[in-house]
């Protein structure tokens, strides 16, 4: 696709400016100050107030607000849109923009099912618009550094990639929106249900999955041979909050990710590239890399990062290659589909977790006993919770047989 060249600040509409959308709003402030964008409009059910729009109040023309994305795009003449809305709305809103020739930054996960992902990607391609998926870690310059180290044999023969994510979320996190912690909602899809798939692997720690796949060189939809899941929940929700996925790329090797929202303490998520003579650990939110290999001392480095919206703007102005187009997230969507099609997550027995005070007044969180160590051990050994001996992760009937 040949993107149109743009030299003036690009008018952008932000769909979803609260919650995680606040991050995008702040990023737009930064880019507006740099003369790269103007905030043409905000699509929200309830309009932002003056404080939320601070920094844009003197902009001319002023920011247009409304709850209809198509109408906002028509009224503002926006060239790009950021879609940071509930997961089930992603495909329809992305296509609303694409049909108007508006380029996209679409938040992750790009869709709640592989069929919806295909519909979105096909529509964007047919419209001839650019689309960037919001996996910010794919903009890290550390990725190319790690690939170079592996290619040059610094850790020997690659053996596999293991991801670890141990986060803390209060029970209120799962009440933040009607779709939070849900696998499905009443709606038109299937037998009266709309897919959501708001699980730990597919939304809050989706970056661990996508980063692990990127480092394994398995990003396309046809790059995977198999996906196996272990899905559990300590909270009274539909979706999973403590899970493991094992991914087998067609070219060999193994990719695993263990993730939880029920950790004893929050840790920076990371991905380990295992080799026959060493390992490389990548803390992807920090762009930090640690190389450990036989016969050498540990070596740590911190790398830069290309912002994905800036990369989209560069694509429009100079033809720069997109860092996270839909084609580069097909494998991730195969994982989402595996989670969607898996049996509902297993509720952990009361003895497997405890409650503790959360961050706010009266807030409560749930902690799975020993989960911090299990998540770390999983990334170290490329092994799931059941293989690591977690009693609550054993397949049904195994206890009676043992």
Image: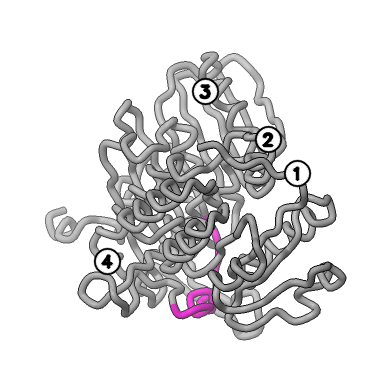
Q: Secondary structure at mark 1?
A: loop
Tell me the distance, in whole angstroms, between the alpha carbons under discs 1 and 3. Answer: 47 Å
Farthest left residue?
Answer: 401
The answer to whether 367 is drawn above or below residue 225 in the figure is below
Residue 113: tell me if it is visible.
Answer: yes
Upstream in sequence: badge 3 or badge 4: 3
Upstream in sequence: badge 2 or badge 4: 2
The number of numbered badges drawn on the structure is: 4
Residue under label 4, please give it: 344
Quadrant for residue 139, please give it: top right
The answer to whether 11 is drawn above or below residue 190 in the figure is above
**Mark 1, residues whose alpha carbon is within 10 Å: few (<14), some, or many (≥20)?**
few
Residue under label 2, please give it: 318
Upstream in sequence: badge 2 or badge 1: 1
Tell me the distance, in whole angstroms, between the alpha carbons under discs 3 and 4. Answer: 38 Å
Residue under label 3, please give it: 278
- Residue 269: x and y, percent? 56, 49
Q: Which residues are magenta?
A: 166-178
Q: Are marks 2 and 4 in contact (CB under 8 Å)?
A: no
């Amino acid at each position: 696709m040949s993107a149109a060249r743009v030299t003036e600040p690009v008018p952008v509409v932000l769909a979803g400016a609260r919650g995680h959308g606040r991050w995008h709003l702040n990023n737009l402030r930064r880019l507006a100050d740099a003369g790269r964008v103007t905030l043409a409009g905000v699509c929200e059910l309830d309009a932002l107030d003056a404080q939320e729009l601070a920094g844009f109040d003197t902009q001319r023309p002023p920011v247009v607000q409304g709850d209809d994305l198509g109408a906002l795009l028509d009224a503002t003449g926006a060239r790009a849109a950021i879609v940071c809305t509930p997961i089930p709305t992603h495909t329809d809103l992305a296509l609303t923009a694409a049909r108007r020739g508006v380029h996209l930054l679409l938040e992750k996960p790009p869709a709640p099912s592989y069929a919806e992902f295909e519909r979105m990607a096909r529509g964007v391609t047919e419209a001839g618009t650019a689309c960037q998926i919001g996996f910010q870690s794919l903009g890290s310059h550390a990725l190319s550094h790690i690939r170079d180290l592996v290619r040059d044999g610094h850790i020997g023969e690659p053996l596999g990639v293991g991801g670890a994510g141990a986060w803390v979320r209060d029970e209120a996190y799962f009440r933040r929106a009607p779709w939070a912690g849900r696998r499905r909602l009443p709606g038109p899809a299937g037998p009266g249900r709309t897919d959501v798939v708001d699980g730990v692997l597919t939304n809050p720690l989706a970056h661990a999955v996508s980063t692990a796949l990127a480092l394994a060189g398995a990003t396309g939809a046809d790059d995977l041979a198999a996906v196996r899941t272990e899905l559990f929940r300590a909270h009274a929700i539909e979706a999973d909050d403590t899970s493991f996925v094992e991914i087998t790329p067609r070219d060999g090797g193994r990719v695993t990710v263990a993730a939880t929202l029920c950790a004893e303490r929050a840790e920076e998520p990371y991905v380990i590239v295992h080799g026959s003579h060493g390992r490389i650990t990548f803390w992807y939110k920090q762009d930090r890399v640690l190389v450990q290999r036989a016969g050498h001392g540990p070596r740590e480095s911190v790398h830069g990062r290309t912002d994905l919206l800036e990369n989209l703007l560069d694509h429009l102005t100079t033809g720069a290659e997109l860092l996270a187009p839909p084609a580069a997230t097909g494998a991730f969507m195969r994982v989402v589909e595996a989670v969607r099609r898996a049996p509902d997550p297993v509720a952990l027995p009361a003895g497997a977790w405890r409650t503790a005070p959360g961050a706010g007044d009266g807030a409560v969180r749930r902690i799975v006993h020993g989960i911090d160590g299990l998540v770390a051990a999983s990334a170290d050994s490329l092994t799931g919770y059941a293989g690591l001996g977690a009693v609550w992760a054993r397949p049904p009937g195994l206890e009676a047989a043992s």
